[in-house]
Image: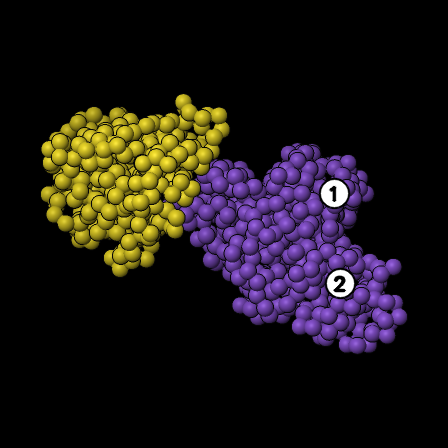
Chain colours: A yellow, B purple
C-alpha cells in the first residue's frame, strides 16, 4: 500500500458530524451523505450544514488572504485525481491550480484519452485511481448522481465538480463567497446573512446544476431566490426545489426585485431534441444594457460561465462595473483550495 | 404413482372459498381430495402416501406470477429458466409467465418451444408470453395462432409498448381470435426519452429526466378506447386487454371505469409499486430504478386501494434480474428492474394482510387464482379435485430475513435485501413434486 493510501484511510473519521438537523428550516435542507461515503466528500450542497459552509468560507478567506508561501506545502505529496467526463475550463483549471498551490500532486484523467473510451466503468476507473494512490477524486460527469456511485465504491473523498443536471456545489460556494463579499456581508454565515437580498437566476434552469446548487443554498442564508425562464427551460416543479423559491416568467419583473442577477447559458448539449426559439429567447431573457439600466441598475451581475455573449448576456453588461464574473472565477480558486483541504482532512475545514 | 397427504394445515382455496382446517390428498400430479382433518387418513394409508405435517401453516394453491423475465435465451448471465424457476419455487410460485424480451426476442413458435423444452430444467411450470409484434418492434404483428399452438399463453411486447394505434387495434383483434390476452406495457415512449424515474419535484432536484403519469395513463386510455370500439362493434370475439405493472392512480382510474363499463380489461400491480415510492431513488439507488418507475405516495396508496377494491386483478412481480456490474452504473445508464419472486408473498402479507387487513383468502386469490384465470391456465390457482397438485405451504405468522445472496436466482438486484419480512414459505409442490423445502 502506498503511503498516500494509508494516510487517506487514517484520516477518515468513522461517521459524519451530526449537527445539521436543527439548523435547517426544513427537514430536507441538509441530507448528510449515506453510510460508506467519505465525510470529506462534497456530493451535494444539501449535505453541508451552515456551520460547515461557514467553515469552508472562512478557510477560503484565510487561504486567499495569506501569502501563498504559508500554505504551499499544506498538502505536500498528497495525490489528487481529476476525473473529467465532460469538458471544462474554469472548474478543472481552478481545482488543478488550487491543488498545486497547496503542494499536492494532481493527475488528470479525461474520458477522451483514457480507458473510459474502451468501455471501462466509472467504478473500475475509480478503483484504478485509488490503487494508484489517489486520495481524493474530483469528478465531473454527464450523468446526474455519478459522484455518489464513485464515492460509494472507492470510499475516497469525492468532490462533485458538476454532475449532469444535478449539482455543482463548489460553484454555489464560490457564488456565495462572491455575493457576500460584493454586498459587503463577509461577516458570518448565518440563516440571516442574506436577509433582504433577492437573487434571480435566469435562463436554462432545467438543465443547470449551477441553478440547483445555488437555489438549494442561498435561501438557507435568508436570500429570496427567483427562478426565471421560459416554460420549456423552467418547469413548474422547480418551485418545489426549496421552500420560498418563486418562479417568474417575466424577466423585467424579476430584475426589478433583485439585487443579484445570475445569468445562465442555454445548455445545447442537454436539450435532448428540445427546440428553442433563440430570437424570442433573447428578446425575453437577455440581460442587456436597456433592460439592466431600466430595471436593476445596481444589481450585481453574475454568470458561472461559459457565457454565450450576445445570447443570454451582452458584452457591455458582462464587462460592466457591476459584473462579478471574473471575481467568481477567482473565488473558485480559494473555495476549491478550502474544499481540497477539507477533503483530505476528513471532512473538517 | 406417488401420493402425498398434507395434514393439519389451514387450507385456503379461493375458488371454493375454503378458509379452514382441511387435509389435502395428492396423487401423482393431481389433487385427489380435500377433507376434514383426519378424514383422509385411511385413504392415504392405503395408498402409502407420504405424510406432510402442515400444523400452523397455510396450505394454498401454488402462486402464479404472470410477469417474470427469465432471460433465456440470450442473457443467461442474469438468469436462466432453471435458476429463475428455482427462485420462483423458493417464493411459493408454481407457475411463471415469462416475457419475450429475450435475445433473440421470443416472437416465433420455435423460441416458444425452446423455452418449454425439458432441457431448460424448469423446476416449476413456465408459460411463455410471446412477442405481440415481430422482434417487438411494434410494426408487424406475429402469428398468434401458431404461437398459441406452440404453448404461448398471451402476447406482449413487454419492455416496450405497442405504440401505433393501428397495430394495437390489429393486435387486439388477432389476440381475441386466438383466444389470448393482449398484454400491454403501457408507456408512451415518445415522451419518456432519456427518462429514468418518476417525473416531479424529486426528479427535478436529482437532475434526472422524469417519466410523467400521462406517459402511462395516456396509453392505458388509448388501449381502453380501442377495446371499447371493438367490443361495441359486436364484430368478432371480445378482446381482452391486460395492463401490466400499473403504477399510477390515473391509469388505475381509467381501468376502474373500463371495468364498470363491462369491458374485458384486467391489470396487475407489482409489489414494489405498492411498497415503495420514488423516495427510494434518493442517493441514486439503482435498485430503485425500474420501468414503470416508483411513483408518488398518492400513486402507491392508489395501488393498495385498487388491490383492496378489486380494480387490480392480481399481483405480479415483474421479476427482472440484472447482474451486479449492470446495476453498479450511473443511475441513468443502469438497466431497469428488480428481482421479485423471493419476496412477493412476504411483501404482500406485510402491506396488504398486516397493514390493510386483507384476508389471506383474498391475498391468495390475487397471487394464484386470479392470475391463473387471466392467463387461462387451467387447473392452476385452485385446490379442487383433479386440479394440478400445485401447492404452497407457508407460515403467515413467523418472519424471515431475506438474504439475496442465498437466492437461487442468478441476480440479487433487489431493494429488499436484508429485510426481515413476515410470511415464510415452508414448502412448494409443483405437480406433485416437492420442489422447495425450507
Q: Is residue A156 above or below residue B51?
A: above
Residue B394, label in figure:
none
Q: Position of residue A168 (x, y in %)?
A: 31, 39
Q: Residues within 10 Å of mark 2 (few under 14, many from 20)?
A: many
Of label 1 and label 2, which has the lower sequence position?
1
| Mark 1 and mark 2: Cα distance apart in space | 26 Å
Residue B105 horizontal side relative to residue A249, left or right: right
Image point 29% across, 45% down: which residue?
A11
Q: Residues within 10 Å of mark 1 (few under 14, many from 20)?
A: some
Looking at the image, which residue sits at the far top? A113
Q: Is residue B187 visible?
A: no
Residue A20 horizontal side relative to residue A73, left or right: right
Image quadrant in which you'd find residue B26:
bottom right
Chain name for mark 1: B
Image quadrant in which you'd find residue A7:
top left
The C terminus of chain B lies in quadrant = bottom right
Given residues B90 and B286, the one toward you in this image is: B90
Residue to which mark 2 is pinned: B382
Image point 76% across, 54% down: which residue?
B377
Amino acid at each position: 500500500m502506498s503511503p498516500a493510501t494509508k494516510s487517506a484511510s487514517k484520516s477518515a473519521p468513522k461517521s459524519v458530524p451530526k449537527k445539521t438537523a436543527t439548523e435547517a428550516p426544513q427537514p430536507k435542507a441538509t441530507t448528510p451523505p449515506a453510510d460508506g461515503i467519505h465525510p470529506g466528500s462534497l456530493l451535494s450542497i444539501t449535505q453541508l450544514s451552515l456551520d460547515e459552509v461557514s467553515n469552508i468560507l472562512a478557510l477560503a478567506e484565510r487561504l486567499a488572504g495569506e501569502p501563498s508561501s504559508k500554505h504551499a506545502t499544506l498538502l505536500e505529496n498528497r495525490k489528487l485525481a481529476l476525473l473529467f467526463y465532460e469538458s471544462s475550463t474554469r472548474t478543472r483549471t481552478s481545482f488543478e491550480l488550487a491543488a498545486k498551490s497547496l503542494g499536492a500532486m494532481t493527475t488528470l484523467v479525461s474520458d477522451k484519452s483514457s480507458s473510459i473510451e474502451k468501455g471501462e466503468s466509472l467504478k473500475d476507473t475509480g478503483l484504478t485511481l485509488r490503487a494508484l494512490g489517489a486520495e481524493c477524486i474530483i469528478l465531473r460527469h454527464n450523468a446526474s448522481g455519478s459522484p455518489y456511485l464513485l464515492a460509494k465504491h472507492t470510499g475516497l473523498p469525492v468532490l462533485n465538480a458538476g454532475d449532469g443536471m444535478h449539482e455543482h456545489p463548489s460553484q454555489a460556494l464560490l457564488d456565495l463567497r462572491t455575493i457576500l463579499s460584493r454586498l459587503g456581508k463577509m461577516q458570518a454565515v448565518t440563516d440571516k446573512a442574506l436577509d433582504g437580498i433577492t437573487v434571480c437566476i435566469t435562463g436554462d434552469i432545467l438543465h443547470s446544476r449551477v441553478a440547483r446548487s445555488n437555489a438549494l443554498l442561498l435561501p438557507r442564508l435568508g436570500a429570496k431566490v427567483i427562478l426565471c425562464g421560459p416554460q420549456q427551460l423552467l418547469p413548474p416543479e422547480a418551485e418545489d426545489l426549496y421552500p420560498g423559491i418563486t418562479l417568474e416568467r417575466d424577466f423585467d419583473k424579476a430584475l426589478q426585485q433583485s439585487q443579484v442577477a445570475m445569468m445562465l447559458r442555454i445548455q445545447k448539449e442537454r436539450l435532448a431534441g428540445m427546440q428553442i426559439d433563440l430570437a424570442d429567447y433573447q428578446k425575453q431573457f437577455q440581460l442587456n444594457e436597456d433592460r439592466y439600466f431600466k430595471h436593476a441598475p445596481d444589481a450585481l451581475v453574475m454568470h458561472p460561465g461559459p457565457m454565450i455573449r450576445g445570447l443570454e448576456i451582452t458584452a457591455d453588461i458582462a464587462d460592466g462595473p457591476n459584473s462579478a464574473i471574473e471575481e467568481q472565477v477567482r473565488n473558485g480558486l480559494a473555495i476549491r483550495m478550502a474544499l481540497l483541504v477539507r477533503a483530505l482532512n476528513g471532512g473538517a475545514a | 404413482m406417488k401420493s402425498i397427504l398434507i395434514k393439519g394445515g389451514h387450507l385456503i382455496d379461493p375458488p371454493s372459498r375454503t378458509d379452514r382446517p382441511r387435509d389435502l390428498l395428492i396423487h401423482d400430479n393431481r389433487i385427489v381430495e380435500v377433507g376434514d382433518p383426519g378424514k383422509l387418513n385411511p385413504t392415504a394409508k392405503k395408498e402409502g402416501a407420504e405424510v406432510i405435517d402442515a400444523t400452523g401453516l397455510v396450505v394454498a394453491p401454488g402462486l402464479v406470477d404472470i410477469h417474470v423475465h427469465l432471460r433465456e435465451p440470450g442473457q443467461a448471465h442474469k438468469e436462466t429458466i432453471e435458476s429463475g424457476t428455482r427462485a420462483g419455487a423458493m417464493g411459493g410460485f408454481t407457475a411463471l409467465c415469462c416475457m419475450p424480451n429475450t435475445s433473440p426476442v421470443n416472437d416465433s413458435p420455435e423460441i416458444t418451444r425452446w423455452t418449454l423444452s425439458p432441457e431448460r430444467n424448469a423446476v416449476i411450470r413456465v408459460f411463455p408470453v410471446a412477442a405481440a409484434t415481430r422482434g417487438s418492434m411494434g410494426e408487424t404483428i406475429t402469428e398468434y395462432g401458431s404461437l398459441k399452438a406452440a404453448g404461448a399463453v398471451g402476447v406482449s411486447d413487454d419492455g416496450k409498448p405497442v405504440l401505433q394505434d393501428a397495430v394495437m387495434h390489429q393486435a387486439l383483434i388477432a389476440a381475441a381470435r386466438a383466444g389470448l390476452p393482449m398484454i400491454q406495457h403501457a408507456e408512451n415512449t415518445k415522451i419518456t426519452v432519456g427518462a429514468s424515474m418518476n417525473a416531479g419535484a424529486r426528479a427535478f432536484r436529482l437532475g434526472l429526466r422524469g417519466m410523467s403519469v400521462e406517459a402511462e395513463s395516456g396509453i392505458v386510455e388509448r388501449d381502453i378506447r380501442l377495446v371499447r370500439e371493438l367490443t361495441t362493434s359486436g364484430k368478432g370475439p371480445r378482446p381482452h386487454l391486460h395492463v401490466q405493472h400499473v403504477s399510477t392512480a390515473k391509469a388505475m382510474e381509467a381501468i376502474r371505469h373500463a371495468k364498470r363499463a363491462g369491458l374485458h380489461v384486467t391489470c396487475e400491480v407489482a409489489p414494489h409499486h405498492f411498497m415503495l415510492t420514488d423516495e427510494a431513488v434518493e442517493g441514486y439507488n439503482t435498485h430503485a430504478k425500474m420501468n414503470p418507475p416508483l411513483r408518488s405516495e398518492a400513486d402507491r396508496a392508489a395501488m393498495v386501494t385498487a388491490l383492496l377494491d378489486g380494480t387490480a386483478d392480481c399481483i405480479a412481480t415483474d421479476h427482472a434480474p440484472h447482474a451486479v456490474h449492470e446495476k453498479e452504473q450511473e443511475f441513468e445508464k443502469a438497466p431497469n428492474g428488480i428481482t421479485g419472486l423471493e419476496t412477493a408473498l412476504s411483501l404482500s402479507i406485510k402491506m396488504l394482510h398486516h397493514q390493510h387487513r386483507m384476508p389471506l383468502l383474498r391475498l391468495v386469490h390475487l397471487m394464484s387464482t386470479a392470475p391463473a384465470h387471466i392467463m387461462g391456465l387451467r387447473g392452476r390457482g385452485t385446490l379442487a379435485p383433479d386440479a394440478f397438485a400445485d401447492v404452497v405451504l407457508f407460515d403467515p405468522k413467523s418472519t424471515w430475513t431475506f438474504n439475496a445472496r442465498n437466492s437461487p436466482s442468478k441476480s440479487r438486484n433487489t431493494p429488499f435485501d436484508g429485510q426481515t419480512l413476515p410470511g415464510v414459505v415452508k414448502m412448494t409442490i409443483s405437480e406433485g413434486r416437492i420442489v422447495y423445502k425450507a
